[in-house]
Image: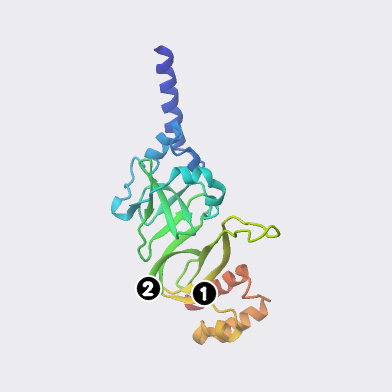
Amino acid sequence: MRKLTILTILFFCVYNHGFTQQVNPINTSGVNDGINSAIIANVNRIKTGQIISVNHLRLRTVDKSVLKENIDLEKKKYLTYSFEKASVDNYDTRAYVRYNIFNDEIEFIKEMNIYYLVKEVGRKVQFIRTGIIYKVFELDKEKHFFKVHVEDKYSLVAKQKVRYIEPKVAKSGYDRAKPGDYKRIRDELYIADENNKLEKIVFKKKAFYSIFGIHSESIKEYIKFNKLNFKKLDDLKTIIQHYNSLLNP
């Protein structure tokens, strides 16, 4: 009995200490395993913080038997398969979430269940460890999460996509069958204005420079002087940052 009591005390000491330190990402393979379950059940609570309301969440039904058999394939749907610490909107709470690119959903652990966040224009999720930001914008009358590369009056954002490739059946003894697969495809880049309106970036000179209106000539000169290539993401980020500096001298 005494030994059990000591072990219990040690467990809670370790548990409480963990919340004051940087916490490692939680892998879903441990969702229902002993200590991880205890951590996950409380991971979206901070003593002085708000709890994210269930009004902003929808329950995700998970077929665990399918996950177990196809775990490597399932992982390809995600930015990272492990849940990582993130902030959501202006809540004080830090939650563990992951981005399901294929379903375009931020999945969220609450009380040992997996939920996904309801999309609302302007909703913002920032991963603590990497600083990566996702924000909700409306595109073609539907709401989507976009990765934020530059956040300013005019932001540079990306719509990430994962495509499912149907399995291929061997039609003859000379043909080879292929299982289904998920593949990342090229991101679509947009400029978002201060009202969260999107304009897709077209990588043809005339269409590209027209985005900047009366500043198009200034942008053209800036690109030429600094030997930038607007088709390269890092250079494009620099260009958008410069554009914002022209708007906010």
Instruction: Please state the horizontal and vertical placement of residue 195, each as a whole percent of the image.
Output: 38, 73
**At 38% from the left edge and 65% from the top edge, which residue is drawn?**
122
- For label 2, the crowd category at 10 Å Cα-Cα, with few meaning under 14, some 14 to 19 and many 20 or more, is few
The answer to whether marks 2 and 1 mark residues whose Cβ atoms lie closer than 8 Å is no
**Residue 149 appears in view:** no
Of residue 47 and residue 137, the one placed in the foreground of this image is: 137
**At 55% from the left edge and 84% from the top edge, which residue is drawn?**
207
Instruction: Please state the horizontal and vertical placement of residue 34, each as a whole percent of the image.
Output: 44, 31
Residue with the mark numbered 2: 141
The kind of residue tagged 1 is Ser
Residue at the extreme right: 174
* Residue mark closest to the camera, 2 vs 1: 2
* Left or right of 222 in this view: 243: left
Residue with the mark numbered 1: 245
Instruction: Please state the horizontal and vertical placement of residue 191, each as a whole percent of the image.
Output: 49, 74
State whether residue 171 is above or below residue 191.
above
Position of the N terminus, as image quadrant, is top left
Callout 1: helix, strand or loop? helix
Residue at the extreme top: 2
- For label 1, the crowd category at 10 Å Cα-Cα, with few meaning under 14, some 14 to 19 and many 20 or more, is few
Of residue 216 and residue 68, the one placed in the foreground of this image is: 68
* Left or right of 128 in this view: 195: left
The kind of residue tagged 2 is Lys
**Residue 189 appears in view:** yes
Instruction: Please state the horizontal and vertical placement of residue 117, each as a whole percent of the image.
Output: 37, 55
First in residue order: circle 2 vs circle 1: 2
* Left or right of 80 in this view: 110: left
